[in-house]
Image: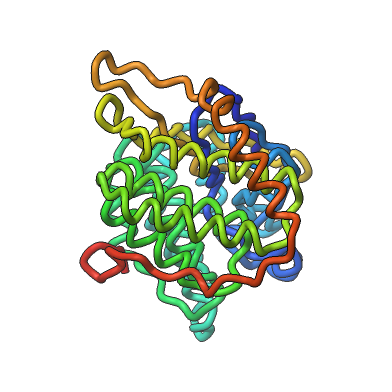
Amino acid sequence: MLYLIKTNIPFILVFLIATILGCQKQKEKQSDSVLTVSVEDSALTGFTPVHPIKVPTITSGLNETTNTEPHKNQLKQRMLQENYVEALQLMPHVTEEILARAKGKSEEEPELLFHLRGIYCYLFLMLDQDEDAYKIIKEMPIEPPGNVPAYLISMNNILVLLRLNKVDEIVGEANKILSIPDIPFMIEHAATDTLIVAYLINNDNDSAKETINLWKKLLLSAQFDEDVKFNHIRTLFLYEYYIEHQLQNEYYLSFRVIKPAPPSVHPLNNEEIVYGYGYYGADIISRKDGSVLDTSPFFDSLKENIDSFMKSSQKVVPLPDPFPVLQNNDEQNSIE
Protein backbone atom coordinates (compact mmCIF):
# COMPACT_ATOMS: atom_id res chain seq x y z
CA MET A 1 0.00 0.00 0.00
CA LEU A 2 1.28 3.41 -0.90
CA TYR A 3 0.42 6.47 1.15
CA LEU A 4 1.21 9.92 -0.23
CA ILE A 5 2.01 12.24 2.64
CA LYS A 6 1.27 15.87 1.83
CA THR A 7 3.74 18.63 2.55
CA ASN A 8 1.42 20.68 4.79
CA ILE A 9 1.63 18.16 7.65
CA PRO A 10 4.03 19.43 10.37
CA PHE A 11 5.79 16.24 11.47
CA ILE A 12 5.45 12.96 9.61
CA LEU A 13 6.61 9.76 11.25
CA VAL A 14 6.08 6.83 8.95
CA PHE A 15 5.42 3.34 10.24
CA LEU A 16 3.56 1.56 7.46
CA ILE A 17 3.06 -1.83 9.02
CA ALA A 18 5.56 -2.97 11.56
CA THR A 19 6.98 -6.13 10.01
CA ILE A 20 10.09 -6.75 7.89
CA LEU A 21 11.26 -10.34 7.51
CA GLY A 22 13.32 -10.41 4.32
CA CYS A 23 12.51 -11.25 0.73
CA GLN A 24 14.58 -14.42 0.57
CA LYS A 25 12.82 -15.85 3.58
CA GLN A 26 9.51 -14.98 1.96
CA LYS A 27 10.33 -17.09 -1.09
CA GLU A 28 11.40 -20.04 1.05
CA LYS A 29 8.35 -20.01 3.31
CA GLN A 30 5.61 -18.62 1.07
CA SER A 31 3.29 -21.58 1.48
CA ASP A 32 4.15 -22.30 5.11
CA SER A 33 3.52 -18.95 6.79
CA VAL A 34 0.32 -17.39 7.97
CA LEU A 35 1.80 -14.14 6.71
CA THR A 36 4.60 -13.33 4.35
CA VAL A 37 6.17 -10.00 3.55
CA SER A 38 6.12 -8.00 0.36
CA VAL A 39 8.50 -5.05 0.16
CA GLU A 40 7.57 -2.18 -2.13
CA ASP A 41 9.31 1.08 -3.03
CA SER A 42 7.58 4.39 -2.51
CA ALA A 43 8.64 8.02 -2.60
CA LEU A 44 7.40 9.82 0.49
CA THR A 45 6.99 13.58 0.56
CA GLY A 46 6.64 16.03 3.41
CA PHE A 47 9.15 16.34 6.23
CA THR A 48 10.25 12.76 5.75
CA PRO A 49 13.15 12.08 3.37
CA VAL A 50 12.15 12.70 -0.23
CA HIS A 51 13.77 9.64 -1.73
CA PRO A 52 12.76 6.02 -2.35
CA ILE A 53 12.66 3.95 0.82
CA LYS A 54 11.62 0.40 1.54
CA VAL A 55 8.08 0.27 2.88
CA PRO A 56 7.20 -3.07 4.46
CA THR A 57 3.71 -4.41 3.84
CA ILE A 58 2.25 -7.51 5.38
CA THR A 59 0.62 -9.93 2.97
CA SER A 60 -1.30 -13.03 3.82
CA GLY A 61 -0.04 -16.20 2.14
CA LEU A 62 -3.34 -17.77 1.23
CA ASN A 63 -2.41 -19.44 -2.03
CA GLU A 64 -2.50 -23.09 -0.93
CA THR A 65 -4.01 -25.44 -3.49
CA THR A 66 -5.32 -27.76 -0.77
CA ASN A 67 -8.15 -27.07 1.63
CA THR A 68 -6.31 -28.08 4.77
CA GLU A 69 -6.83 -24.64 6.33
CA PRO A 70 -10.41 -23.66 5.49
CA HIS A 71 -10.69 -21.03 8.22
CA LYS A 72 -7.67 -19.18 6.91
CA ASN A 73 -9.23 -19.09 3.46
CA GLN A 74 -12.47 -17.80 4.97
CA LEU A 75 -10.46 -15.16 6.81
CA LYS A 76 -9.15 -13.84 3.50
CA GLN A 77 -12.67 -13.57 2.11
CA ARG A 78 -14.06 -11.79 5.18
CA MET A 79 -11.22 -9.31 5.24
CA LEU A 80 -11.62 -8.42 1.57
CA GLN A 81 -15.33 -7.98 2.24
CA GLU A 82 -14.37 -5.65 5.12
CA ASN A 83 -16.41 -7.89 7.39
CA TYR A 84 -14.08 -7.46 10.35
CA VAL A 85 -16.53 -8.81 12.93
CA GLU A 86 -16.74 -12.22 11.27
CA ALA A 87 -13.02 -12.14 10.48
CA LEU A 88 -12.33 -11.69 14.18
CA GLN A 89 -14.64 -14.56 15.04
CA LEU A 90 -12.58 -16.80 12.75
CA MET A 91 -9.28 -15.94 14.42
CA PRO A 92 -9.31 -18.63 17.16
CA HIS A 93 -9.81 -21.27 14.45
CA VAL A 94 -7.15 -19.69 12.22
CA THR A 95 -4.75 -19.62 15.16
CA GLU A 96 -5.36 -23.32 15.80
CA GLU A 97 -4.79 -24.17 12.13
CA ILE A 98 -1.60 -22.18 11.86
CA LEU A 99 -0.02 -23.32 15.12
CA ALA A 100 -0.82 -26.92 14.23
CA ARG A 101 1.85 -26.60 11.53
CA ALA A 102 4.41 -25.58 14.13
CA LYS A 103 4.08 -28.71 16.26
CA GLY A 104 7.55 -30.09 16.78
CA LYS A 105 9.05 -26.89 15.32
CA SER A 106 9.34 -24.67 18.36
CA GLU A 107 11.68 -22.29 16.52
CA GLU A 108 8.81 -21.28 14.21
CA GLU A 109 6.28 -20.46 16.92
CA PRO A 110 7.48 -16.91 17.81
CA GLU A 111 7.23 -15.79 14.18
CA LEU A 112 3.79 -17.33 13.71
CA LEU A 113 2.54 -15.81 16.97
CA PHE A 114 3.93 -12.43 15.92
CA HIS A 115 2.00 -12.59 12.65
CA LEU A 116 -1.18 -13.80 14.34
CA ARG A 117 -0.88 -11.00 16.88
CA GLY A 118 -0.59 -8.57 13.97
CA ILE A 119 -3.85 -9.81 12.44
CA TYR A 120 -5.66 -9.53 15.77
CA CYS A 121 -4.40 -5.96 16.27
CA TYR A 122 -5.36 -4.95 12.74
CA LEU A 123 -8.90 -6.27 13.11
CA PHE A 124 -9.37 -4.59 16.49
CA LEU A 125 -8.08 -1.29 15.11
CA MET A 126 -10.46 -1.47 12.15
CA LEU A 127 -13.30 -2.03 14.64
CA ASP A 128 -12.11 0.93 16.76
CA GLN A 129 -11.46 -1.45 19.65
CA ASP A 130 -8.09 0.04 20.58
CA GLU A 131 -8.19 -1.24 24.16
CA ASP A 132 -8.59 -4.79 22.87
CA ALA A 133 -5.58 -4.32 20.59
CA TYR A 134 -3.64 -3.14 23.65
CA LYS A 135 -4.67 -6.29 25.55
CA ILE A 136 -3.40 -8.40 22.65
CA ILE A 137 0.11 -6.94 22.73
CA LYS A 138 0.14 -7.41 26.51
CA GLU A 139 -1.17 -10.97 26.43
CA MET A 140 0.82 -12.10 23.37
CA PRO A 141 4.35 -10.85 24.06
CA ILE A 142 6.97 -12.01 21.58
CA GLU A 143 10.37 -12.40 23.17
CA PRO A 144 13.55 -12.26 21.12
CA PRO A 145 15.76 -13.97 20.16
CA GLY A 146 13.95 -15.58 17.31
CA ASN A 147 13.08 -14.96 13.69
CA VAL A 148 11.39 -11.65 14.54
CA PRO A 149 13.77 -8.69 15.06
CA ALA A 150 13.23 -7.04 18.44
CA TYR A 151 12.70 -3.59 16.91
CA LEU A 152 9.68 -4.86 14.98
CA ILE A 153 8.02 -5.99 18.17
CA SER A 154 8.46 -2.52 19.66
CA MET A 155 7.25 -0.90 16.42
CA ASN A 156 4.04 -2.92 16.57
CA ASN A 157 3.59 -1.96 20.20
CA ILE A 158 4.07 1.74 19.44
CA LEU A 159 1.44 1.69 16.71
CA VAL A 160 -1.13 0.48 19.24
CA LEU A 161 0.08 2.69 22.10
CA LEU A 162 -0.25 5.81 19.92
CA ARG A 163 -3.98 5.25 19.61
CA LEU A 164 -4.35 5.20 23.37
CA ASN A 165 -1.94 8.11 23.98
CA LYS A 166 0.16 6.02 26.37
CA VAL A 167 3.10 8.40 26.08
CA ASP A 168 5.30 6.96 28.83
CA GLU A 169 5.07 3.48 27.31
CA ILE A 170 5.84 4.95 23.89
CA VAL A 171 9.02 6.46 25.36
CA GLY A 172 9.99 3.05 26.71
CA GLU A 173 9.43 1.27 23.39
CA ALA A 174 11.23 3.94 21.36
CA ASN A 175 14.21 3.72 23.70
CA LYS A 176 14.20 -0.06 23.30
CA ILE A 177 14.50 0.36 19.54
CA LEU A 178 17.33 2.88 19.83
CA SER A 179 19.28 0.61 22.18
CA ILE A 180 19.47 -2.11 19.51
CA PRO A 181 22.67 -1.98 17.42
CA ASP A 182 22.65 -1.88 13.62
CA ILE A 183 18.95 -1.22 13.10
CA PRO A 184 17.84 0.11 9.68
CA PHE A 185 18.31 3.85 9.38
CA MET A 186 14.68 4.68 8.61
CA ILE A 187 13.55 2.77 11.69
CA GLU A 188 16.14 4.57 13.81
CA HIS A 189 14.95 7.90 12.45
CA ALA A 190 11.26 7.14 13.01
CA ALA A 191 11.94 5.92 16.55
CA THR A 192 13.96 9.06 17.30
CA ASP A 193 11.24 11.37 16.01
CA THR A 194 8.68 9.43 18.03
CA LEU A 195 10.83 9.76 21.13
CA ILE A 196 11.32 13.52 20.72
CA VAL A 197 7.61 14.15 20.23
CA ALA A 198 6.77 11.98 23.25
CA TYR A 199 9.23 13.95 25.40
CA LEU A 200 7.73 17.25 24.21
CA ILE A 201 4.21 16.00 24.93
CA ASN A 202 5.42 15.21 28.45
CA ASN A 203 7.01 18.70 28.69
CA ASP A 204 10.40 17.05 29.14
CA ASN A 205 12.30 19.58 27.06
CA ASP A 206 15.70 18.59 28.45
CA SER A 207 15.42 14.99 27.27
CA ALA A 208 14.03 16.14 23.93
CA LYS A 209 16.98 18.53 23.44
CA GLU A 210 19.49 15.83 24.40
CA THR A 211 17.95 13.45 21.86
CA ILE A 212 18.04 16.17 19.18
CA ASN A 213 21.73 16.80 19.81
CA LEU A 214 22.56 13.09 19.66
CA TRP A 215 20.75 12.76 16.36
CA LYS A 216 22.58 15.79 14.96
CA LYS A 217 25.88 14.11 15.79
CA LEU A 218 24.76 11.02 13.92
CA LEU A 219 23.78 13.06 10.87
CA LEU A 220 27.13 14.85 10.95
CA SER A 221 29.11 11.62 11.13
CA ALA A 222 27.24 9.23 8.86
CA GLN A 223 27.35 9.30 5.08
CA PHE A 224 23.71 9.93 4.21
CA ASP A 225 22.29 11.15 0.97
CA GLU A 226 22.10 14.97 1.02
CA ASP A 227 18.32 15.00 0.54
CA VAL A 228 17.91 12.55 3.40
CA LYS A 229 20.10 14.63 5.68
CA PHE A 230 18.43 17.91 4.66
CA ASN A 231 14.90 16.71 5.41
CA HIS A 232 15.89 15.16 8.73
CA ILE A 233 17.76 18.21 9.95
CA ARG A 234 14.85 20.49 9.02
CA THR A 235 12.64 18.51 11.39
CA LEU A 236 15.24 18.62 14.18
CA PHE A 237 15.62 22.39 13.89
CA LEU A 238 11.84 22.71 14.01
CA TYR A 239 11.77 20.76 17.28
CA GLU A 240 14.48 23.07 18.61
CA TYR A 241 12.47 26.13 17.54
CA TYR A 242 9.48 24.76 19.43
CA ILE A 243 11.60 24.44 22.59
CA GLU A 244 13.69 27.62 22.38
CA HIS A 245 10.76 29.90 21.55
CA GLN A 246 8.63 28.29 24.27
CA LEU A 247 5.82 27.54 21.88
CA GLN A 248 4.40 25.17 24.50
CA ASN A 249 2.97 28.25 26.24
CA GLU A 250 0.58 28.78 23.33
CA TYR A 251 0.59 25.38 21.67
CA TYR A 252 0.84 21.71 22.54
CA LEU A 253 1.96 18.64 20.60
CA SER A 254 -0.31 15.72 19.92
CA PHE A 255 0.16 12.46 18.03
CA ARG A 256 -2.16 12.14 15.05
CA VAL A 257 -3.02 8.65 13.91
CA ILE A 258 -4.52 7.78 10.53
CA LYS A 259 -6.84 4.78 10.57
CA PRO A 260 -5.55 1.84 8.50
CA ALA A 261 -6.81 1.36 4.96
CA PRO A 262 -9.00 -1.66 4.16
CA PRO A 263 -7.29 -4.83 2.93
CA SER A 264 -6.70 -5.19 -0.79
CA VAL A 265 -5.55 -7.84 -3.23
CA HIS A 266 -1.81 -7.78 -3.77
CA PRO A 267 -1.10 -6.12 -7.15
CA LEU A 268 1.38 -8.84 -8.15
CA ASN A 269 -0.37 -11.88 -6.70
CA ASN A 270 -4.15 -12.07 -6.58
CA GLU A 271 -3.96 -14.98 -4.14
CA GLU A 272 -2.62 -12.67 -1.43
CA ILE A 273 -4.10 -9.79 0.50
CA VAL A 274 -2.25 -6.72 1.72
CA TYR A 275 -3.09 -4.67 4.79
CA GLY A 276 -1.31 -2.46 7.27
CA TYR A 277 -1.50 -0.37 10.41
CA GLY A 278 -1.55 2.94 8.51
CA TYR A 279 0.75 5.84 9.41
CA TYR A 280 0.92 8.56 12.01
CA GLY A 281 2.37 11.98 12.64
CA ALA A 282 2.28 14.81 15.16
CA ASP A 283 0.54 18.16 15.13
CA ILE A 284 1.29 21.44 16.93
CA ILE A 285 -2.12 22.56 18.17
CA SER A 286 -3.25 25.98 19.43
CA ARG A 287 -4.30 26.02 23.07
CA LYS A 288 -6.61 28.92 22.24
CA ASP A 289 -8.76 27.61 19.39
CA GLY A 290 -7.56 24.06 18.67
CA SER A 291 -6.24 24.89 15.20
CA VAL A 292 -3.18 23.12 13.82
CA LEU A 293 -0.15 25.38 13.47
CA ASP A 294 1.22 25.80 9.94
CA THR A 295 4.98 25.36 10.41
CA SER A 296 5.99 26.31 6.87
CA PRO A 297 6.89 29.95 7.71
CA PHE A 298 9.33 28.81 10.39
CA PHE A 299 11.63 27.29 7.81
CA ASP A 300 12.43 30.73 6.36
CA SER A 301 13.89 31.81 9.71
CA LEU A 302 15.66 28.45 10.07
CA LYS A 303 17.22 28.51 6.61
CA GLU A 304 20.56 29.97 7.76
CA ASN A 305 20.96 27.36 10.51
CA ILE A 306 20.01 24.55 8.15
CA ASP A 307 22.43 25.74 5.44
CA SER A 308 25.24 26.03 8.00
CA PHE A 309 24.61 22.51 9.26
CA MET A 310 24.58 21.10 5.73
CA LYS A 311 27.98 22.69 5.01
CA SER A 312 29.42 21.30 8.26
CA SER A 313 28.05 17.86 7.50
CA GLN A 314 30.25 17.62 4.42
CA LYS A 315 33.30 17.39 6.68
CA VAL A 316 34.52 14.10 8.14
CA VAL A 317 33.36 13.80 11.74
CA PRO A 318 34.06 10.83 14.07
CA LEU A 319 31.11 8.56 14.74
CA PRO A 320 29.33 9.27 18.02
CA ASP A 321 29.00 6.69 20.77
CA PRO A 322 26.08 4.26 20.44
CA PHE A 323 22.73 5.93 21.00
CA PRO A 324 22.10 5.89 24.77
CA VAL A 325 18.82 5.13 26.45
CA LEU A 326 17.89 8.46 27.99
CA GLN A 327 15.14 7.69 30.49
CA ASN A 328 11.82 6.00 31.19
CA ASN A 329 13.16 2.74 29.78
CA ASP A 330 12.19 0.66 32.75
CA GLU A 331 9.89 -2.29 32.91
CA GLN A 332 6.93 -0.37 34.25
CA ASN A 333 6.95 2.04 31.30
CA SER A 334 7.35 -0.52 28.55
CA ILE A 335 5.50 -3.48 27.16
CA GLU A 336 7.29 -6.75 27.57
93 up-or-down from 79: above or below:
below
Of residues 39 and 173, the one drawn nearer to the viewer in this rendering: 173
**Quarter holding residue 333:** bottom left
44 relative position to 248: left or right? right
Position of 227 with respect to 160 (left or right) is: right
Position of the C terminus, as image quadrant, is bottom left
Name the quadrant containing residue 175: bottom left
Q: Residue at x 32, y 56 (%)?
A: 136
* Quadrant that contains the N terminus: top right
**Observer-nearest of 68 and 9:** 9
Query: What residue do we see at 45% from left, 63% from top?
Result: 153
Q: Nearer the viewer, residue 139 or 196?
A: 196
Numbered label tally: 0
Q: Is residue 31 visible?
A: no
Side of 164 relative to 311 (left or right): left
Residue 52 visible, this orientation: yes
Q: Where's residue 154, x and y in %?
A: 43, 61
Closest to the observer: 140 or 87? 140
Residue 116 place in picture, x, y as percent: 46, 59
Q: How is the image coloured?
A: rainbow
Counting from the top left corner in percent of width and height, residue 14 is at: 55, 43
Q: Residue furthest bottom?
A: 104
Q: Residue furthest top?
A: 289
Location of residue 51 with respect to 19 vertically, above or below:
above
Q: Give the vertical position of 44 relative to 37 (above or below).
A: above
